[in-house]
């Protein structure tokens, strides 16, 4: 259905549900950091845990959730699993949001500005 006078089509309920699920998964700072790291290049779970500062079991659980949602994939290289983001649209959205918020960075002595839920 077109929005009043604008000619834009509203997305289907299925598309909105899928987008909300993806955003829900990315709402975790740890999972967002993992996706951000993987957007820069593939990694195994040990490398990711070191990079994001998380415990190995926790990072592994986050990766499992991201894989089940189809946001992250993996492949076997010898004895290790290598993870990567195989969806350029997810990479674009994460990079856009992080870059925009980084561009708003306030001076160190300014109070932190947070986005608030509606």
Image (tube, helix red, strand yellow):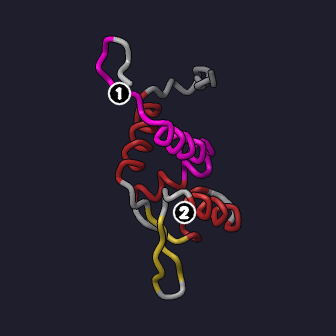
Is residue 102 shown left or right of residue 45?
A: left
SS label for mark 1: loop
Return the residue at label 1.
9
Q: Quadrant of residue 8?
A: top left
Is residue 13 within the magenta segment?
yes
Magenta-tinted stretch: 5-33
Residue at the extreme top of the image, as rendered:
5
Residue at 47%, 31% (x, y): give it.
101
Spatial CA distance of label 2 from label 1 is 30 Å
Residue at 69%, 61% (x, y): give it.
58
* Camera-side residue of 45 and 11: 11
Q: Say which of marks 2 and 1 sits in front.
A: 1
Residue at the extreme front of the image, as rendered:
1
Q: Residues within 10 Å of mark 1 (few under 14, many from 20)?
A: few
* Quadrant the C terminus occupies: top right
Residue at 58%, 25% (x, y): give it.
115
* Camera-side residue of 11 and 101: 11
- Above or below, 51 against 89 in this view is below
* Camera-side residue of 47 and 23: 23
Q: Main secondary structure of the magenta part?
A: helix
* Camera-side residue of 111 and 33: 33
Return the residue at label 2.
67
Q: Quadrant of residue 100?
A: top left
Is residue 109 within the magenta segment?
no
Residue at the extreme bottom of the image, as rendered:
78
């Amino acid at each position: 259905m077109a929005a009043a006078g604008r000619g834009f089509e509203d997305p289907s309920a299925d598309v909105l549900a899928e987008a909300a699920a993806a955003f829900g998964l990315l709402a975790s700072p740890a999972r967002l950091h993992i996706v951000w790291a993987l957007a820069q290049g593939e990694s195994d779970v040990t490398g990711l845990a070191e990079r994001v500062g998380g415990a190995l079991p926790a990072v592994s659980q986050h990766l499992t959730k991201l894989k089940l949602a189809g946001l992250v994939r993996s492949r076997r290289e010898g004895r290790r699993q290598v993870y990567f983001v195989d969806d350029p649209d997810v990479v674009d959205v994460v990079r856009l949001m992080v870059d925009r918020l980084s561009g708003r960075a306030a001076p160190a002595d300014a109070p932190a500005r947070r986005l608030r839920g509606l």
